[in-house]
Image (cartoon, rainbow, N blue to C red):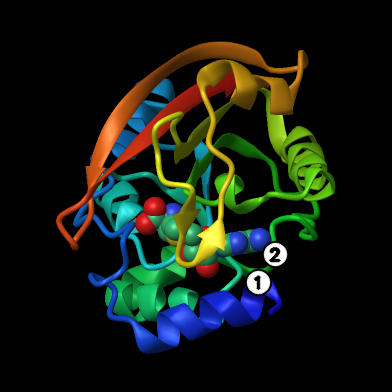
Amino acid sequence: MHPSDHWENVYRNKSFDAVSWYAPHLGESLRLIQELCPDANASIIDIGGGESTLVDDLLHRQYVDVSVLDISSTAIDFTRQRLGPLAQEVTWHVGDITQHDFGDQRFDLWHDRAVFHFLTDPAARQAYVELVRRSVRPGGYVLMATFGPDGPLQCSGLDVVRYDDQSLHHEFGEGFQMMGSQLAEHNTPMGTRQQFLYCWCRA
Ligand SMILES: C[S@@+](CC[C@H](N)C(=O)[O-])C[C@H]1O[C@@H](n2cnc3c(N)ncnc32)[C@H](O)[C@@H]1O
């Protein structure tokens, strides 16, 4: 099945709070974004934002240049509806991140929670990293959250790649300067726990 069919199917059939990655707020992501980019004019993109409330929380903290990309138009439509008139403040992209082109758009911070780890094909990971290189301004930040070394082997019925900070940094290469990392536990709505790795670097 093509990834877009898989994700459309998920979002058409599951409530926003019934998916394993659901959290009412992406607290770790939000905290790190505010630390790395305190300037409300910073250009921030959430890759694979899905139906998460990160975009709402960024807007409520007065960030004025926020973009969201997802492969699922159902997820993007749901999030736009939830935001109501505020949705007009956001730049929306529907597309596959391994094939996308942001044109002239450049970002000060690239955020990805639970998308990169689905890229099991090295060529797809390479395409992703090349897009990061083209799209993040020199000196900008890349904040990634993947499953950690003790995280699950699958999510949403799909295989994932688990990372520690070294193996994740290796995917990005020497052009990126590692700044920090931390492990965090995510409590799923099903009552299980998943280990995430948060890792941030500078382009
Ligand atoms: C596990 S969910 C995480 C959603 C959100 N980031 C969060 O943390 O709540 C993965 C998200 O990535 C999107 N996605 C998966 N593969 C993608 C791809 N190749 N390009 C763009 N988005 C993708 C899915 O539609 C889904 O919304």
- In the rendered structure, the answer to whether residue 4 lies left or right of residue 59 reads right
**Rendered location of residue 144, percent (x, y):** 51, 35
The residue positioned 42% from the left and 80% from the top of the image is 11
Which residue has dot 2 on it?
96
Compared with 137, 103 (above or below) is below
- Counting from the top left corner in percent of width and height, residue 60 is at 24, 51
Quadrant in the rendering for residue 181? top left
Image quadrant where residue 188 sits? bottom left
The response on whether ligand 1 sits within 8 Å of label 2 is: yes
Characterize the local packing of mark 2: few (<14), some (14-19) or many (20 or more) Cα atoms within 10 angstroms.
some
In the image, residue 168 above or below residue 118: above
Q: Nearer the viewer, residue 69 or 88?
A: 69
Q: Earlier in the sequence, mark 1 or mark 2?
A: 1
Q: Which mark is residue 24?
A: none
Residue 63 screen position, x and y as percent: 38, 44
Image label count: 2
Residue 15 visible to an observer of this rendering: yes
Q: Secondary structure at mark 2?
A: loop
Say which of 169 and 41 sits in front.
169
Q: Residue at x 38, y 80 (%)?
A: 78
- Left or right of 111? Residue 182 is left
Residue ID for mark 1: 3
Confirm or reject: label 1 Cβ below 8 Å from ligand 1.
Answer: yes
Tell me the element at label 1. Answer: helix
